[in-house]
Image (cartoon, rainbow, N blue to C red):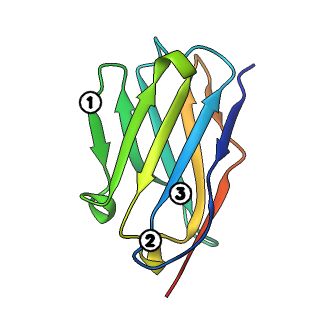
Amino acid sequence: QVQLEESGGGLVQAGGSLRLACAASRSIFSINAMGWYRQTPGKQRELVASITSGGRTNYADSVKGRFTISRDNAKNTVYLQMSSLKPEDTAVYYCGANFGSFYWGQGTQVTVSA
């Protein structure tokens, strides 16, 4: 069993920044890809950003140039730095990773006011 715990969500004005963190209860060193996803009511969960064990990153078009994903293997933590936030970024953000089975965190709410 693996626990993923997100933190860092909150309320921010448009144009502001937040940094999300996802701490894993097990080593992420060998986990090939870890990702941040988001979901709004009535919509499917979507991939926002992912990062491989080698540091290769991938971003949804809607966040390219504004969000940065990174990982600290020593701390078993993945981060999502979000800048130039827009009201449409409002969502519950989830961390997800495949540790043999796919695990999700409990989610953290990000609310961007206009």
**Sequence order check, earlier mark of 2 and 3:** 2
Residue type, numbered disc 1:
Arg
Residue at left offset 66%, top offset 55%: 108
Q: Residues within 10 Å of mark 2 (few under 14, many from 20)?
A: some
* Residue 12 x/y as whole percent: 55, 73
Q: Can I make out residue 45 in this image?
A: no
Q: Of circles 2 and 3, which is in front?
A: 2
**Sequence order check, earlier mark of 3 and 1:** 3
* Cβ atoms under marks 2 and 3 closer than 8 Å: no
Residue type, numbered disc 2:
Gly
Q: Identify the secondary structure beneath mark 2.
A: loop
- Disc sitting over residue 16 in the figure: 2
Report the side of 96 relative to 29 (left or right).
right
Q: Which residue is mark 1?
A: 56
Report the side of 65 relative to 101 (left or right).
left
Vertical placement of residue 72 versus 30, above or below: below
Residue at left offset 65%, top offset 43%: 6
Residue at left offset 38%, top offset 42%: 69
Q: Which residue is mark 3?
A: 38
* Residue 112 x/y as whole percent: 53, 76
Vertical placement of residue 106 versus 71, above or below: below
Residues under labels 2 and 3: Cα distance?
18 Å
* Residue 41 x/y as whole percent: 64, 72
Quarter of the image where the N terminus is located: top right
Q: Identify the secondary structure beneath mark 3.
A: strand
Q: Identify the secondary structure beneath mark 1.
A: loop
Q: Of circles 2 and 1, which is in front?
A: 2
Q: Residues within 10 Å of mark 1 (few under 14, many from 20)?
A: few
